[in-house]
Amino acid sequence: MENEGETILKECILRDGAEYCRPVSPQTPAGNGADEAASVPPGEARGPGLFDWADPILADPLGWAREHVLSFEVLLPIGIQVGAIAAAMLLGAIIAGPLRRLVRQGLARLPQNLQDVIGDVAPRLVRPALTLALFYLGQVILQSTGHDATLVRVAFSLSVAFLIITLAGTFLPEALRKPALYIALIVAGMNAFGVLDDFIAWTYTIGPPFGGRRINPPFVLQAILTAGIFLWAANWLSKRLKTRVETLPKVEPSLRILITNALQVGLFFAAAVLTLAGLGIPLSGLAVLGGAIGVGLGFGMQQIVANFISGVILLTDRSIKPDDVIEVEGSYGVVKSLGLRYASVITRDGKEHLIPNEQLITDRVINWSYSNKQVRIKRRLRVEYETDLKMACRLVVEGAEMTERVLEEPAPKCLVMEFGEEAVEIEARFWIQDPQNGVNNVGSEVMLNVWDRFQAHGIDIPLRHEDVLITPGSTLKVEMVRPGRTDGAARTVELVSPEKENRGENE
């Protein structure tokens, strides 16, 4: 191309699939290093080599050290930062003692439950927290005065990591302490080298999109923290409301359990909804998914749903209440608690049976204390026909009255039930009002008292006996074993009728 007698050349370079052209003078040879550098399009400038920074050091190590390490301009900022770090540590060591005593005095005014939680931890955190605050203050002062604060920032980052490690070793479970330690060290190192902000900005750019936003690590961390805060608040509030409901004087125990369970479920559901709303997740988009999950759970969790509904019925109709004495399928005990899935029943031998609520609804249940706790106990006895029955009945009543747990009203009674073939059968009937303490034990105590009174008045309890009739012509085989013989040797004696004996002699 010619312009006013001057020839203008163009050099075109193919780069990344695109052609970049530039005008060059005829004196400049195409393709030299300067032209190549100028030919790079904006935003794509070539950077230095990976190890170009080491060239000055390798070329003149002593000169580089005098210029960049041993010079006054370099040593002065380092000295200022080291002095700031030392001053912060010294000041923290001086102030930590009095501040720790003030913290202990403040903890002494807190409730006992809070003292048990933070009483040993708070004093140990005073010095690390104070040193951390002083490092941060020194970093702010140096940056505001125009001085370099790199070393102070490193010390601040390490102090943050140390404080996090101390908290993790105190409050976190054993399984989470090492991960928290590693995360704290990594974050402290990144902050010390000044790449933490860049790393955080990079984490916002990764992850799949969802609902108009991106599921990235900050979003996941935000979700965990938000859910943890709301669930903790729901749990704390449900415990406080449960304590308040349990103190209501005019509310039945079963209704108290129903109210507390309903409050707990409602609070946790509200916590879940608030968590989703706080994260910006549209609840309308979860309606279809929730319906499908509900149908699947309805088929797969029929038994659990049945127990849940049965629990609500038991808590509302008050047919079974805490501290009731019930018997179901041979399990006899006291109802310790009622839940939405099962009832806890403790038997007299200390076993705790978790009976599903559906079983308490569909099966036959004996509630010994449904309307009241008075229970009548019956015990049968046998006396001989020669016994004075009126005196025997009086002694039975006296034996029942001597027992501590037997009620005076209704009074114990003794009834003549049957004239049997071998003895007269009588029955003791008495009442107790604490079946939760056992039924058979009080019955045994009454029988022992009756036995003592029968023995004192010469009344015998007949033993069962059987009459064996040997008819003529039969044979009785008797085996006799000597005492002390263990070899099984025995003599057999056979008794026969006279007719058989005479027949044997004739033979």
Image (tube, rainbow, N blue to C red):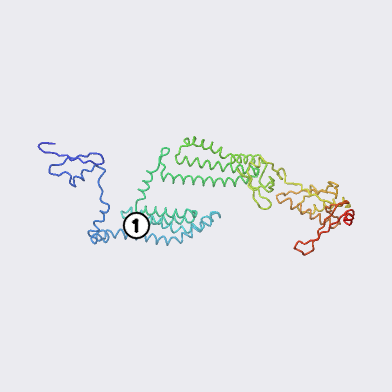
Q: Say which of 394 and 291 sits in front.
A: 291
Residue, disc 1: 151
Dot 1 amino acid type: Leu
- Horizontal relation, residue 340 to residue 142: left or right: right
Residue 89 position (above or below residue 235): below
Q: Give x and y (percent) for residue 306.
A: 61, 39
Q: Could you tell me if residue 65 is visible in this image? A: yes
Q: Say which of 112 and 442 sits in front.
A: 442
Q: Give x and y (percent) for residue 454.
A: 84, 55
SS type, badge 1:
helix
- Horizontal relation, residue 303 to residue 279: left or right: right
- In which quadrant of the rendered image does the C terminus lie? bottom right
Q: Which residue is painted at 52% across and 46% down in the image? A: 233
Residue 299 position (above or below residue 412): above
Q: Could you tell me if residue 326 is visible in this image? A: no
- Horizontal relation, residue 372 to residue 224: left or right: right
Q: Give x and y (percent) for residue 17.
A: 25, 39
Q: Give x and y (percent) for residue 6.
A: 11, 38
- In which quadrant of the rendered image does the N terminus lie? top left
Q: Say which of 119 and 282 sits in front.
A: 282
The residue positioned farthest toward the left in the image shown? 5
Question: Circle 1: is it few (<14), some (14-19), or many (20+) Cα within 10 Å?
Answer: some
